[in-house]
Image (cartoon, helix red, strand yellow):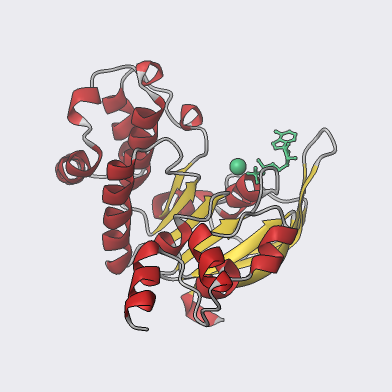
Amino acid sequence: MGDNRIIEAEGITYTYPDGTLAVENAHFYLERGERVAIVGPNGSGKSTLLKILSALMEPQEGSIRFYGKENVKEKELRKKFGIILQNPDDMLFNATVMEDLEFGPAQIGMKRNEFEKILEELDEIFSLSPLLKKPPFKLSEGEKQRVAMACALATKPEVLFLDEPFSALDVGMKRKVVEYLNKLNAEGMAMVTVSHELDIIPRVADRVYLLNRRVVAEGKVEEILSNDKILTENGMEPLPVAKIAAALGMKDIPLTIEEFINALKSK
Ligand SMILES: Nc1ncnc2c1ncn2[C@@H]1O[C@H](COP(=O)(O)OP(=O)(O)O)[C@@H](O)[C@H]1O
Ligand SMILES: [Mg+2]
């Protein structure tokens, strides 16, 4: 408890106007600088929960505290939270990519020279230069995802929320982006990543919630991702590397190829 908790949610229930119960009695917490993931199959309520945790939507039931308070002003949260929505089209609405990048920083009153400095850094990671003058709707899906991420990072958020952020990125870009996010995390940025695919989770999270409308399991990434039974029961495919290791009778289940190779070498 105490000062370290950025988000603390209990009993969160959300039903859409058409009657769909998307999230039921879910709980969640995030501490400063943490890397947390929410995983679950399609339609398990991940995007809905992420919007609630990032204060974009309010639940019908349950309580949610930001920075230990019930009533933090939304404007304050917008300064601290960066959000990458699952569909980049929901985030890119200006005439050009440059205007989209400028939008968030302008909203929070960032100085121009600070914005230019961060844009330079983001350009190195996300290769934005050739895209700046283009209208967002003309970009490819991967380009949209890169721009959406850069937009969320342009305000230097204290917490970054990512909803299936790597789905359209190629392997090289994905590796570069993950490395950059982890550098920002080492400098203090907390991350909440939503994904229906498990392969990236060991690289972006230390703690994980398995969501199937309700929170069906939570714990360290090693614990949850090596639990074949609970994953399978909830519509998730365990990682191939974990399956092979379990079949070989390994005690410590590796979650990445590198861990697997190291475990084999040390035998
Ligand atoms: N705007 C909406 N109106 C009605 N139902 C919705 C809406 N958005 C999502 N849902 C439903 O809520 C459930 C959870 O959706 P979502 O949070 O997007 O899950 P996930 O991100 O895990 O795939 C699904 O059954 C989905 O069809
Ligand atoms: Mg989703």
Label count reads 0
Quick check: which quadrant has ligand 2?
A: top right
The residue at the far right in this view is 19
Residue at left offset 27%, top offset 43%:
172
Q: Where is residue 182 in the image (x, y as percent from the top left)?
A: 31, 61
Give the quarter of the figure containing the C terminus. bottom left
Q: Position of residue 243 (x, y in %)?
A: 56, 64
Residue 230: image location, x then y, percent: 70, 66
Q: Answer yes or no: is residue 263 visible.
A: yes
254 vs 217, left or right, is left
Residue at screen point 59% across, 59% down: 238
Q: Which of the image's four quarters has the N terminus?
A: bottom right
Residue 256 figure quarter? bottom left
x, y (%) of residue 147? 33, 34
The residue lying at 53 percent from left, 81 percent from top is: 2
Nearer-the-camera pick, 51 or 176: 176
Can you tell which quarter of the image residue 229 is in? bottom right
* The one of 256 and 173 positioned closer to us in this rendering: 256
For residue 71, side relative to residue 106 (left or right): right
Looking at the image, residue 266 lies above or below residue 139? below
- Does residue 8 appear in this view? no
Q: Considering depth in this image, is 103 or 183 the residue closer to the camera? A: 183
Q: Residue at (42%, 43%) from the top-left corner? A: 166
Taking depth in this image into account, of 139 and 258 the one nearest to the observer is: 258
